[in-house]
Image: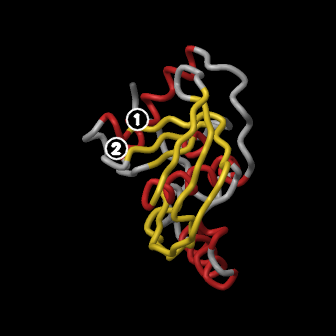
Amino acid sequence: MAVRPIVVYPDPVLLQPCREVPEITREIRDLIPDMFDTMYAAPGIGLAANQIGLDLRIAVIDLSVGKDPKDRHVLINPVILATELRFSEEEGCLSVPDFLENVTRPRKVRVEALDASGKKFQLEAEGLLAKAVCHELDHLDGLLFLNRLSPLKRNRIKKKIQKMIRAGEWAGSTR
């Protein structure tokens, strides 16, 4: 188990859809604890594989941030089956550090995925868990929470980041 560097915007790996995991190999099973360790160290409640530079449809989520093993979710090749209602709430991202904005997400979501052993399952999530699932699945589709903002807000943040990059003040990709 290891903490891996988190990739930050505008790294191209964050901006393209991830490829499906064809089979659950030993490497995939070994990757999952690293993803949880990286997420906890950040600290965060969700992490997608492309946030550590891997082009794989894998996400991990833990609302308890390591305090309750029952809150750990591994989603491999996830697909959203249904959504209900919508709500707006402040959201941030480990790959876009220090920026928070209100994002509208489904209040309820049903997703189908494979677990770490390759078994297909469905997860019904509400509230913060639904928000985290949607946020991580966006990552796997090559989208950031910035894509969910109005063009004006999105461009304002992108311009600030570009200015920080030019000034050498942006975290940048560490991989």
Above or below for 80 versus 154: above
How far across and down, in percent of the image, does residue 137 sit? 62, 50
- Identified at 34% across, 36% down, the residue is 70
Left or right side of 155 for 2:
left
Q: Which comes sooner in the sequence, label 2 or label 1?
A: 1
As shown in the figure, which amino acid type bears the numbered disc 1? Val
**In the rendered image, which quarter contains the C terminus?**
top right
Above or below for 107 versus 116: below
- Identified at 62% across, 59% down, the residue is 83
Mark number for residue 77?
none
As shown in the figure, which amino acid type bears the numbered disc 2? Ala
Residue named by callout 1: 3
Give how far apart the Cα atoms at labels 2 and 1 are. Answer: 7 Å
> Which residue occupies the foreground of this view, 66 or 85?
85
Left or right side of 38 for 131:
right
Circle 2: element type: helix
> Which residue occupies the foreground of this view, 39 or 65?
65
